[in-house]
Amino acid sequence: MADLKALAEAIIKGDQNAAVEITKAALDEGTAAESVLNKGLIAGMDIVGNCFKKNEIYIPEVLIAARAMKSAMEILEPELVKAGVKPVGKFLIGTAQGDLHDIGKNLVAMMLKGAGFEVVDLGVDISPEKFVEQAKATGTQLIGMSALLTTTMPAMEKTVKALKDAGISVKVMIGGAPVTQGYADKIGADGYAADAASAVDVAKNLVA
Ligand code: B12
């Protein structure tokens, strides 16, 4: 019987080899891909997210855990597709127009992937027009925007307006060091989170 607790443990420790080996062994034994995902990978990332939220671990540990998760996901993904497992939701993310800071955005993308979302990462310096175009093209339910510069925050407001003007029914969540809940309220964004682990909770609530 594959040890999915050991898989979660491998993710928490960021042990890429163990994560890949246990995932392969579990699938070879006939364990359902969805169980491997939920009881192994997501369970591990959940703990990583909580420890990060409580400042018990820091960014490097999260990145190492995410790398282990990514390697295991490469093996698991084709099986999930075959089994028709639906993602929790689709999430489109990018940094605000003019903003090249992507470390926080990448962390949020990884944590949401870890929580079972299908993540489309548009990258950096995304214009309101591109967000609108990609929202239409992907049919996403949720968009995330990240800004680290006070000068790029207004681009978030423009993007929220552009999405509304285009009549796209999508929830928008924003974040980044200078961003606050008050700013999210002011520009009409649906959600805000101060860190990547809280972003998962906010995202889950927004698509629920
Ligand atoms: C690394 C860095 C850079 C790197 C970026 C590399 C990269 N690939 O990201 C480089 C060197 C390129 C850079 C460039 C610049 N930078 Co810079 N940079 C930083 C620095 C040191 C760290 C930022 C960071 O990565 N933090 C770590 C991440 C994990 O934190 P975070 O992004 O806040 O993300 C967390 C949360 O906010 C949240 N979150 C983030 N995004 C999202 C999105 C959603 C949807 C949600 C829900 C949550 C969420 O979750 C994350 C994880 O918990 C900061 C200073 C600092 N100590 O913060 C300055 C800083 C942001 N930079 C600054 C400046 C001024 C610049 C430049 C203009 C400098 C220059 N004169 O050229 C350029 C601008 C480039 C551009 N157009 O974007 C200023 C901004 C000042 C301001 N008030 O606007 C800062 C604050 C430095 C300072 N004290 O002056 N920078």
Image: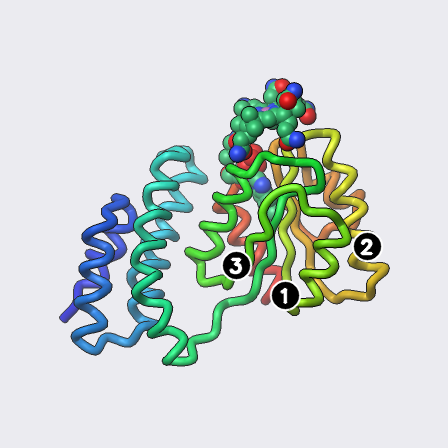
- Three-letter amino acid code at the position of disc 3: Val
Q: Is residue 194 visible?
A: no
Q: Residues within 10 Å of mark 1 (few under 14, many from 20)?
A: many
- Rendering quarter of residue 50: top left
| Location of residue 64 in the rendering, given as x and y in whole percent from the top left corner | 33, 42
Q: Which label was assigned to residue 25?
A: none
- Dot 2: element: helix
Lateral position of residue 207 relative to residue 116, left or right = right
Query: Residue 140: which numbered mark, if any?
Result: 1
Q: Which residue is mark 2?
A: 162
Specify which label sits upstream in the sequence, 3 or 2: 3
Q: Quadrant of ligand 1?
A: top right
Q: Nearer the viewer, residue 125 or 195?
A: 125
* Left or right position of 130 against 64: right
Disc 3 element: strand
Could you give the CA–CA distance between mark 3 and mark 2, rounded to whole angstroms?
Answer: 21 Å
Q: Residue at x 37, y 80 (%)?
A: 83
Residue 119: which numbered mark, if any? 3
